[in-house]
Image (cartoon, rainbow, N blue to C red):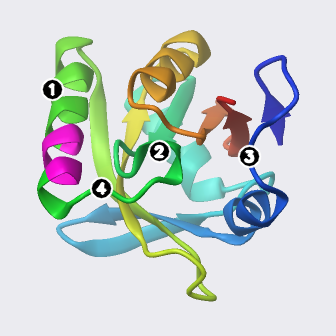
Amino acid sequence: MQNTGMKSAIAPDLLAIYKNSDYRVLEAGETVFVMHIDEPCAPLRNLLGRAGVVSSCFISAYNPRSEPRTDEENAQAQAQLVQDVRQMGLRYLEGVGEDPEGGCAGEPCLLVLGISRENAVMLGNRYGQNALLWSDAEGVPQLLLMR
């Protein structure tokens, strides 16, 4: 788990949920593989290699700062995130981050391929996210804290 340089304002119980969540990557609505923070993920590493990129991030625009928004607000924010990723010329797969213990509802996410760490942090901040997952070519998702 990595912080962007400051002490985190995120509650410890929420950090624990992030750490224990399943981060599912989807294709046609079906789970292709599941990632966990700080655990090597061979399918992610292989995907990055096949795509010819050396990094990725798993990000959502839902519920900024973990404050619930309406379904409509969340859907609009997620659609704008998709637009931003496309404008950056990056490919993505859909996903969902969810707490298997039910502490938080699952949120739609994007696995953005080939994004730099700096641009991932920029998107996380733009969409008011507490954190996101980032991986280099080794395929080990790291939690990057935005606050």
Marks 1 and 3 close (CB-CB < 8 Å): no
Who comes first in sequence, dot 4 or dot 2?
A: 2
- Mark 2 vs mark 1, CA separation in Å: 22 Å
Q: Which residue is mark 1?
A: 83
Which is in the foreground here, disc 4 or disc 2? 4
Residue at position x 68%, y 60% from top? 18
Residue at position x 48%, y 13% from top? 119
Q: Position of residue 75 (x, y in %)?
A: 16, 51
Label 1 SS: helix
Residues packed near mark 3 inside 10 Å, few (<14), some (14 to 19) or many (20 plus): some
Who comes first in sequence, dot 1 or dot 3?
A: 3
Which is in the foreground here, disc 2 or disc 3? 3
Who comes first in sequence, dot 4 or dot 3?
A: 3
Q: Nearer the viewer, residue 32 or 103?
A: 103
Residue 27 to residue 112: above or below: below
Marks 2 and 1 close (CB-CB < 8 Å): no
Q: Which residue is mark 3?
A: 10
Q: Position of residue 35 (x, y in %)?
A: 61, 61
- Mark 1 vs mark 3, CA separation in Å: 28 Å
Q: Nearer the viewer, residue 114 or 83?
A: 83
Label 2 SS: helix
Q: Position of residue 10 (x, y in %)?
A: 74, 46
Residue range highlighted in magenta: 73-78
Which is in the foreground here, disc 1 or disc 3? 3
Q: Residue type at mark 3: give it.
A: Ile
Q: Quadrant of the N terminus?
A: top right
Residue at position x 56%, y 26% from top? 55
Is residue 113 located in the magenta-colored stretch of the structure?
Answer: no
Q: Residue type at mark 4: give it.
A: Arg
- Mark 4 vs mark 1, CA separation in Å: 20 Å
Residue 69 shows which numbered tag?
A: 4
Q: Quadrant of residue 118?
A: top right
